[in-house]
């Protein structure tokens, strides 16, 4: 089954400047927990214990986060503050982490290709940590359930307001069972008037290793970047690629609105 999860985390996070000048976007916290830890916990809950993280310059804090801080541990051991580290310690104990760098930021497709050495020749999950999901059963767990049945690439989607299609990759497909679509077309960030649907791709994927060769052959698309959407469209012409409308909530924490909404949501859910 799927044992590895790739986290493309090399983007500049320009929408959060100046906060992201020296701090990775993935380390911005919703309440007390960095975005990427939510993603790792979702993967772990889906039975994945090998985390492969694609980083870039200025992202070293991610590696430090998933490591023991002996000085800190020693300092708070036996005090009333020790429990603050329980969750992250649990994650560190249960998972292994490996890292590679994307040298040039040439887009999400290119970031995924940069992770090939960490993934090898097996199916894998992809989590974009800035898409924070909350669901009764984690989104990756739902997708893996589906993967057991179909054994093919699966992309998570959600319905978005029609006037927001230009922020997303959008799919066209036939609904083959409830909330499961067989993809026939995909368009990257279409203007609302040209959008073929409002079914938007969000930051959860289950991919098969043949995608790497397809990405290698994919030319830069929208924005001059190598788009995973273009590679997946190519793959869908040869074999089945599914889109899955997941059960749960998603917050686009790469945008200020989404980040604030997520903070309020988790505050209501966990603190109040
Ligand atoms: P985004 O476009 O949301 O991320 O990419 P960004 O570039 O960091 O943010 P802005 O638009 O400048 O504010 C989606 C995901 O893909 C990763 C990002 O880290 C993010 O998780 N990504 C994107 C890469 O790892 N490498 C890239 O070249 C591009």
Image: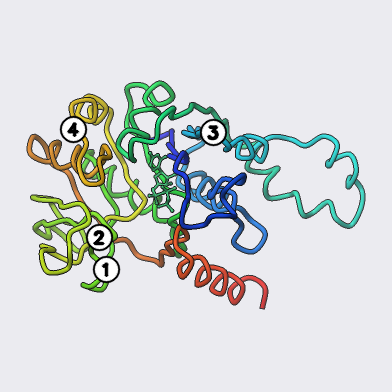
Which mark is drawn over residue 164? Answer: 1
Toward the viewer: 176 or 131?
131
Residue 93 spot, x, y in % from top left:
66, 36
Q: CB of mark 4 within 8 Å of CB of mark 3? A: no
Image position of 19 (left or right of 180): right
Distance between the alpha carbons at the discs numbered 2 and 4: 22 Å
Distance between the alpha carbons at the discs numbered 3 and 1: 31 Å
Where is residue 71, by image quadrant?
A: top right
Residue 48 spot, x, y in % from top left:
47, 39
Disc 3 secondary structure class: loop
Q: Which residue is mark 2?
A: 200
Residue 244 spot, x, y in % from top left:
25, 56
Counting labels gives: 4
Mark closer to the chain start, 3 or 2: 3
Distance between the alpha carbons at the discs numbered 3 and 2: 30 Å
Mark closer to the chain start, 2 or 4: 2
Quadrant where the image shows the N terminus: top left
Quadrant where the image shows the C terminus: bottom right
Question: Residue 266, can we see it?
Answer: yes
Position of residue 209 relative to residue 34, above or below, is above
At horizontal 32% and vertical 61% (from top left) the residue drawn is 246
Disc 4 secondary structure class: loop
Q: Which residue is mark 4?
A: 219
């Amino acid at each position: 089954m799927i044992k590895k999860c790739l986290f493309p985390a090399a983007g500049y996070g320009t929408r959060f400047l100046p906060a992201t000048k020296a701090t990775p976007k993935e380390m911005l916290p919703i309440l007390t927990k960095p975005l990427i830890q939510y993603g790792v916990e979702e993967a772990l809950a889906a039975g994945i214990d090998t985390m492969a993280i694609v980083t870039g310059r200025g992202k070293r804090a991610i590696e430090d986060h998933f490591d023991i801080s002996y000085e800190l541990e020693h300092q708070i051991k036996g005090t009333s503050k020790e429990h603050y580290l329980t969750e992250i310690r649990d994650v560190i104990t249960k998972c292994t982490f490996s890292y590679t760098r994307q040298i040039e930021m040439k887009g999400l497709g290119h970031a995924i290709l940069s992770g090939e050495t960490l993934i090898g020749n097996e199916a894998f999950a992809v989590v974009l940590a800035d898409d924070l999901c909350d669901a009764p059963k984690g989104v990756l767990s739902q997708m893996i359930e589906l993967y057991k049945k179909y054994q093919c690439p699966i992309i998570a989607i959600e319905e978005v307001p029609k006037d927001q299609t230009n922020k997303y990759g959008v799919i066209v497909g036939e609904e083959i069972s409830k909330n499961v679509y067989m993809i026939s077309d995909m368009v990257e960030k279409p203007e609302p008037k040209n959008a073929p649907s409002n079914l938007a791709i969000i930051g959860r994927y289950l991919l098969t290793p043949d995608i790497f060769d397809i990405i290698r052959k994919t030319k830069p698309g929208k924005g001059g970047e190598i788009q995973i959407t273009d590679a997946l469209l190519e793959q869908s012409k040869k074999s089945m690629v599914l889109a899955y409308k997941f059960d749960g909530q998603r917050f686009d924490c790469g945008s200020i609105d989404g980040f604030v909404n997520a903070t309020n949501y988790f505050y209501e859910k966990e603190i109040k």
